[in-house]
Amino acid sequence: MDSNVRPQTMQRITTAEQAKAFVEEKVAEIKAQVKDGKVLLALSGGVDSSVVAALLIKAIGKNLVSVHVNHGLLRKGEPEQVIDVFRNKLGGNLIYIDATDRFLDKLAGVSDPEQKRKIIGKEFIDVFAEEAKKLDGIKFLAQGTIYPDILESDGVKAHHNVGGLPQSLNFELVEPVKLLFKDEVRLIGKALGLPDSMVYRQPFPGPGLGVRCTGAITRDRLEALRESDAILREEFANAGLAGKVWQYFTIVPDYKSTGVKDGKRLWDWPVVIRAVNTKDAMSATIEEIDYALLKKITDRILAEVKGVNRVLYDLSPKPIATIEWE
Ligand code: XMP
């Protein structure tokens, strides 16, 4: 039987009990597969890799070596949450690499979106491979592959993700959730005790904030993007929209306009808000945000984020506009 095909007899996981049973079954399978061997995992903090990490920590404890690479394009608080959950709460063996300078130096002056993606993808693989080489005697590589990745091998994730992890490292793969759909993976995450903010996280592109800081990325504009995104997420959570809207974020385009403050002229960036709903990311509609909430978010961004003098709301559906700006 092809291990990449979900058997027709496999029941859909819809309850906490079924999720618990799946966890027990997978823990036993993982133990049988890797025995006392060490397993390596690139832990992004996204739903899939986080669930795989929690499952493997439950099965083999510190024999899972998770590597969290901070490429400097993560959202506010993300690396801290990964460290808190996987090192402090679950007691896992986590290697944290802050590669911010390395990525931002490589990206300096690069404005072409596909070139930016290539640099981020290649640099990520290089950093991970360098780390893997330092670790002796690792035979296994865990991956957060899920069933839609297998089904839609030419779908959004595959289309956008640049490269993959280096096959040259010659690992045996451990892919415990590869036959599961996203909603099932979330239930497994819940059963493993991961926080809701991780399990119900909105999709976040591999190149991270890099494709929302349009054109050539600068540190100050990236900071404005990170801060405005944090305000948007906080206000969406307060308004009960966090789990309801499919994807919501800010963009800071590489463009300035005139403003005025305390009688002085300003020359600053706009922040664009994007909030969309979709089933499959191939088409998307715009969330009708309540005006009072839009105003509150606007006021906060203008008061709290340095270098910004306008806030805009992008009302363009997909098609014709893509979800990301780059
Ligand atoms: P677009 O912008 O093509 O985005 O409408 C559709 C979905 O794909 C995500 N996206 C990416 N995901 N690497 C990823 O892993 C990427 O380079 C990338 N670009 C876009 C986007 O966030 C949306 O969910």
Image (tube, grey):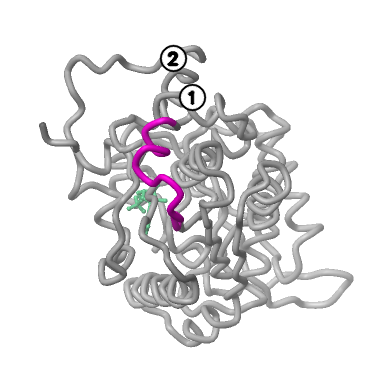
Whether residue 37 appears in magenta in the rendering, the answer is: yes
Relative to 136, is 81 on the left or the right? right
Residue situated furthest left in the rendering: 1
User: Badge 2 is on which residue?
Assistant: 18
Relative to 196, is 278 on the left or the right? left
User: Badge 1 is on which residue?
Assistant: 187
Q: Residue at x 58, y 53 (%)?
A: 312
Q: Is residue 224 above or below residue 316?
A: below
Q: Residue at x 36, y 33 (%)?
A: 29
Residue situated furthest right in the rendering: 262
Q: Position of residue 193 (x, y in %)?
A: 62, 29
Relative to 228, is 186 on the left or the right? left
Badge 1 marks a residue whose secondary structure is helix
Q: Amino acid at mark 1?
A: Leu
Quadrant housing the N terminus: top left
Relative to 306, is 247 on the left or the right? left
- For residue 256, the mark is none
Pair 1/2: label in front: 2
Q: Position of residue 159 (x, y in %)?
A: 25, 56
